[in-house]
Amino acid sequence: MAEEAIRVNKISTTPFEGQRPGTSGLRKKTRVFMQPNYLANFVQSAFNVIRETVSDLSSQTLVVGGDGRYYNREATHLIIRMAAANGFGHLLVGRGGLLSTPAVSAVIRRRGSLGGLVLSASHNPGGIDEDFAARLQNPMQLSRHAGTIIFPKRFLPKEKWNNAAMADAKGEIEKHLAILDKQLAGKTYLVADAFSLAEVCYIPFLDFLPLMEITPPGAVAAWSAKLLARESAQATRPQK
């Protein structure tokens, strides 16, 4: 029996003022998320960014789940429909739409998924008049990959290095830097017109690129040099 083709509807929409994710994703009051197209705009924007590096999603898996707060089930249904319309080949959805943030991370790594959409506002209260949040969970964990390279280089004799694991970690970091390079094209800073928390989070990682023997692409290299030259960045380095 032939599979029935999915009918995809294209819906016109407009941007929402202030719809800018923070360090914990897009977090607003639940009623804000319940506005027509509000969550859909965010989800489609996330999918558009993914398509910049992964043009064919038919072989990719997306993990979806949340902490069960008010509007979790409706939001999960919306994401499932949009993921299908965008061509994702597989979806892994928590039963009843329930998956904790650590569970989403574990499933992404265990199943080799492209990433996940998490519906959780952490410890903030839930309810129709309380908080809701959505976040794109990326399997690229810089600290884990960097640790795979840095730990043996600093603490183990060379004959005990896991060269295959270190090479894989280096490849994953280089993929991330290639994406970052596109995001920085023509920009001085990553997410704003001034130095922000995004730069603060990256500085410790960028400082270890030479130790990991990773050469960043052009835009990242210029950005990194500027950040590491800051007085505050210099002050965090141990004295020789």
Image (tube, rainbow, N blue to C red):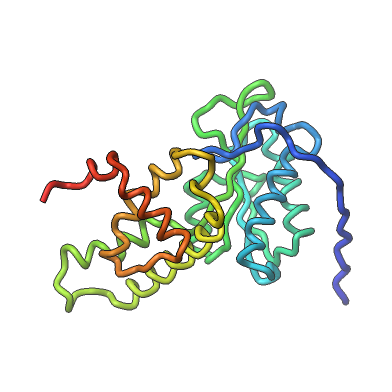
Q: In this view, does 229 lie to the left or right of 101?
A: left
Q: Quick one: which residue is furthest to the top in this view?
A: 129
Q: In the rendered image, which quarter is residue 32 located in?
A: top right
Name the one closer to the observer, 175 or 187. 187
Instruction: Reply above or below: 60 against 117.
Output: below
Q: In this view, does 240 lie to the left or right of 36?
A: left
Instruction: Reply above or below: 64 against 37.
Output: below
Q: In the rendered image, which quarter is residue 232 located in?
A: top left
Residue 187 image position (x, y, % from top left):
54, 50
Q: In this view, does 23 lie to the left or right of 12?
A: left
Residue at 75% across, 46% down: 78
Quadrant including the N terminus: bottom right
Residue 56 image position (x, y, % from top left):
69, 70
Residue at 26% across, 64% down: 211
Q: In this view, does 56 lie to the left or right of 120?
A: right
Q: Quick one: which residue is furthest to the left in this view?
A: 240
Residue 223 image position (x, y, % from top left):
42, 53
Residue at 61% across, 65% down: 53
**Count of numbered marks:** 0
Q: In the rendered image, which quarter is residue 153 located in?
A: bottom left
Residue at 64% across, 63% down: 52
Residue 62 image position (x, y, % from top left):
63, 59
Instruction: Reply above or below: 127 against 116.
Output: above
Name the one closer to the observer, 202 or 169. 202
